[in-house]
Image (cartoon, rainbow, N blue to C red):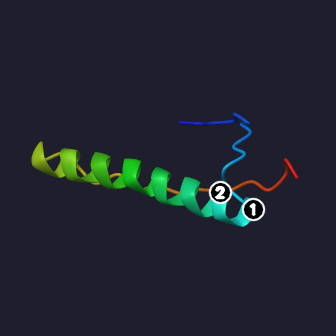
Amino acid sequence: MKRCHLIDIPHISNDEEFIRQVAFHEAGHAAAIHIRNKQQQLPPIYFQIYINHAYK
């Protein structure tokens, strides 16, 4: 899944904290997919999550 959506979140004080939160959020998606696939005895899927700093 490719995501390219810029949002403005004023309650986060700096970009590094926002990037950290996004990384944890995306890792949660990957973990949920992994667990569900394991329950259904599907082959493993490998993920690569990239944080692009190009928007700065």
- Asked if the residue under mark 1 is in contact with the one under mark 2, i.e. CB atoms within 8 Å, the reply is yes
Q: Position of residue 25 (x, y in %)?
A: 47, 52
Separation of residues labelled 2 and 1 (CA atoms): 7 Å
Q: Is residue 50 left or right of residue 21?
A: right
Identity of the amino acid at label 1? Asn
Of residue 15 and residue 38, the one placed in the foreground of this image is: 15
Of residue 42 and residue 20, the one placed in the foreground of this image is: 20
Of residue 54 and residue 46, the one placed in the foreground of this image is: 54
Identity of the amino acid at label 2? Phe
Residue neighbourhood size for the residue with mark 1, other residues' Cα within 10 Å, grouped as few (<14), some (14–19), many (≥20):
few
Which residue is farthest front?
A: 11
Q: Position of residue 31 (x, y in %)?
A: 32, 55
Q: Secondary structure at mark 1?
A: loop
Tag 1 residue: 14
Which residue is farthest right?
A: 56
Q: Secondary structure at mark 2?
A: helix
* Residue shown at 71% from the left, 37% from the top: 7
Q: Position of residue 23 (x, y in %)?
A: 55, 58
Q: Is residue 41 left or right of residue 37?
A: left
* Residue shown at 69% from the left, 43% from the top: 9
* Residue shown at 74% from the left, 54% from the top: 52
Of residue 15 and residue 2, the one placed in the foreground of this image is: 15
* Residue shown at 67% from the left, 55% from the top: 12
- Looking at the image, residue 44 lies above or below residue 20: above
Residue neighbourhood size for the residue with mark 2, other residues' Cα within 10 Å, grouped as few (<14), some (14–19), many (≥20):
few
Tag 2 residue: 18
Quarter of the rendering containing residue 53: bottom right
Q: Position of residue 19 (x, y in %)?
A: 65, 59
